[in-house]
Image (cartoon, rainbow, N blue to C red):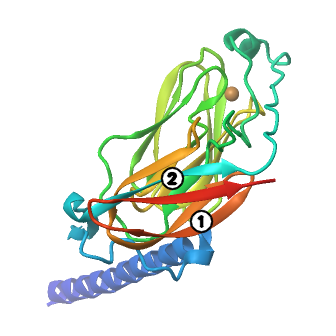
Amino acid sequence: MKRMHDKTLWMLALGIAGVAISAACGGGESRSRKSIRGGAENPTAANAPAAGDGAAAAQSGGLKKVDPATAGSITGVVKWDGARPAPEALDLSGNPDCAKAVKETIYKEDLVVNADNTVANALVSIDTNDRYEVPAEPAVVDQVGCRYIPHVFALQAGQKLKIKSSDPTLHNVHYIPTGDENTEDNFAMPAPGVRERTFNSADWIKFKCDVHPWMGAWAAVKTHPFFAVTGTDGKFTIANVPAGTHTLVLKHESLGEQTATVTVEAGKVATAEFTLKK
Ligand SMILES: [Cu+2]
């Protein structure tokens, strides 16, 4: 009789714990959604139709999957309006290790206007909070020649990020999320090597090095794969975008955000253009 009583109490306790656990999970989920909508992603476009609402996306284990047969692509360029700002060379003489390791002149990277008056390091992405399948291969950022390469990059929430150092000098990786969900961290990398991290929520994360103040990078974490970063020609291409009308968001670390509306048709290439200025 005593034993039965104990068992009943245990069952009750487990039942209550189960309710508490599911309530905590539910709370986390809704907080996460709110943060993605109002925080790291573009708040001005929060009411735009979500990518993947059309027939192009299929559900797979709660995560959407792009069907290339019903997708198109978006391509375009980010132009600069005005005189090209002169690249500003960095003075590494205060740091003998880097001064020795870096063979060529390196420049400030917070605004890079290419020789053809286009803008590098601009992140262009579709505005949606829909969660898509995560690639198995990791994203990679490397510390090489006392710089982060690439300077701006994007990856998916839940995707592995390899943080490498190729330099035989001490770096201290320090990343600072601008959203509420991911956690700040910093760690020393005294020699060439790799660390792995995963960010589970959409974000815009600043990377710096606590040893070398000029070293910086930005990581855009998205719930989907519809993003691209402009390079030395200012161009971007986002492939396999579900057909439909999307809000395209340009984000630049120094110049903020712009949006454009783009309609994608299956099997076709839509175009978009942005212009940035001081
Ligand atoms: Cu460093």
Q: Quadrant of the N terminus?
A: bottom left
Q: What element carries label 2?
A: strand
Label pair 2/1, CB-CB below 8 angstroms: no
The crowd level at tag 2 (other Cα within 10 Å; few <14, some 14-19, many 20+) is some
N-terminal-most mark, 2 or 1: 1
Q: Is mark 1 on a helix, strand or loop?
A: helix
Beta carbon of the mark 2 residue lies under 8 A of ligand 1: no
The crowd level at tag 1 (other Cα within 10 Å; few <14, some 14-19, many 20+) is many
Identity of the residue drawn at 66% across and 53% down: 252
Q: Is residue 19 above or below residue 168?
A: below
Q: Position of residue 266 (x, y in %)?
A: 27, 65
Quadrant in which ligand 1 is drawn: top right
Looking at the picture, which amino acid does disc 1 mark?
Answer: Ala
Residue closest to the eye, 178 or 197: 178
Identity of the residue drawn at 82% across and 33% down: 86
Which residue in the protein does label 1 denote? 40
Image check: 96 left or right of 34?
Answer: right
The numbered dot on residue 242 is none
Looking at the picture, which amino acid does disc 2 mark?
Answer: Gly
Image check: 178 left or right of 194?
Answer: right
In whole angstroms, how far apart are the C-alphas of marks 2 and 1? 24 Å
Residue closest to the eye, 276 or 204: 276
Q: Is residue 26 above or below residue 121?
A: below
Does residue 3 appear in the picture of this structure? Answer: yes
Residue closest to the eye, 206 or 154: 154
Q: Where is residue 182 in the image (x, y as percent from the top left)?
A: 55, 58
Which residue in the protein does label 2 denote? 76
Q: Quadrant of residue 146?
A: top right
Residue closest to the eye, 246 or 65: 246
Identity of the residue drawn at 29% across and 58% down: 133
Does residue 183 appear in the picture of this structure? Answer: no
